[in-house]
Amino acid sequence: LGDSIYHAFTFKVEKRFSAGFSILGAFTASKLIDTLQGTGRPGAVPGTAVQNWNNLRGERSKSYQDMPTRLVLTALWELPFRSGNTFVNSAIRGWQINAINTMEGGRPIALAAPIPNGGNRPNVVPGVSDKVVEPTLAQWFNTAAFSQPAAFTYGNVSRTLPDVLSDGMLNLDVSLFRNLRLGERGNLQIRAEAFNVTNTPTFDIPGRTLGSATFGVVTATAFNPQPRQLQFGLRLVF
């Protein structure tokens, strides 16, 4: 039914400082190439089915699941404050601040075209680049670089564009915890969390169907990350 090949470079660094502060960073640069269909595969962008089962070599391209770069930075600080005053010490002791910053490269863009009794992808216009100097929501890629194939033919554009990606992700989550001991076995945790604290949007892939009014136009934000969310809670462990 298909094949795939994956290469990646990974790098991780961790450092524990004094006063309860530590950081952890993980970076991955990778490329996933396959000839597989994307329908129903978790984490995949929308894409077309195989055009010609008699020519799977023509399906070889960046996978619908390809993610070229991903960087995650995590910081944790257990507040080390101490005071000679018992009341002040009990009020400020046990707090912990956490931050997770995630940065991802854009996702693949898979074009489609309705071809009567033929394939499902557009043709490439020779000599015309699909890239624009400054992508905008109204024109994420050069739509003039693609044309409608004739009926009973197959489009010759690759399953995913090789040099144009969707919007990348920048997300920062922050949390504030405090643990209170309750006797010998009990623990009460006070939690305050903010997801996507900067409320930075990540735009979805642009319209990908040739001939539609939204071809090359970004009309929505991606499902992940969601707009800023605040969450408060108590957790009792006993």
Image (cartoon, helix red, strand yellow):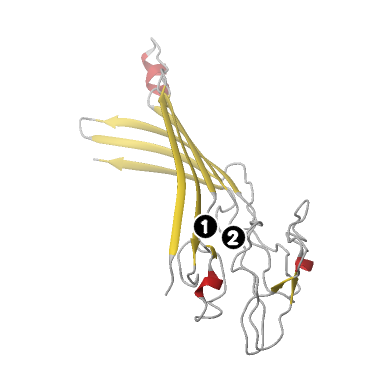
Location of residue 123 (image quadrant): bottom right
The answer to which of 47 and 89 lies nearer the viewer is 47
Dot 2 falls on a residue whose secondary structure is: loop
Q: Is residue 174 visible?
A: no
Residue 185 placement, left or right of 143: left
Residue 108: numbered disc: 2
Quadrant including the N terminus = bottom left
Category of crowding for the residue at label 1, using alpha-carbon neighbours closer than 10 angstroms: few (below 14), some (14–19), many (at least 20) = many
Q: Is residue 159 visible?
A: yes
Dot 1 falls on a residue whose secondary structure is: loop
Residue that extends furthest to the left in the rendered view of this protein: 184
Looking at the picture, how far across and down is residue 32, in whole percent? 49, 57
Q: Residue beneath label 1, please?
A: 66
Q: Is residue 104 above or below residue 35?
A: above
Given contact means CB atoms under 8 Å apart, are the residues at marks 2 and 1 in contact?
yes
The answer to which of 233 and 54 lies nearer the viewer is 54
- Give the amino acid type for the residue marked by disc 2 in the picture: Pro
Location of residue 59 (image quadrant): bottom right
- Give the amino acid type for the residue marked by disc 1 in the picture: Asp
Looking at the picture, how far across and down is residue 69, in whole percent? 54, 47
Q: Is residue 21 above or below residue 2?
A: above
Residue 92 placement, left or right of 181: right
Q: Is residue 41 above or below residue 225?
A: below
Category of crowding for the residue at label 2, using alpha-carbon neighbours closer than 10 angstroms: few (below 14), some (14–19), many (at least 20) = many
Dot 2 or dot 1: first in sequence order is: 1
Residue at horizontal 46 percent and vertical 51 percent from the top: 7
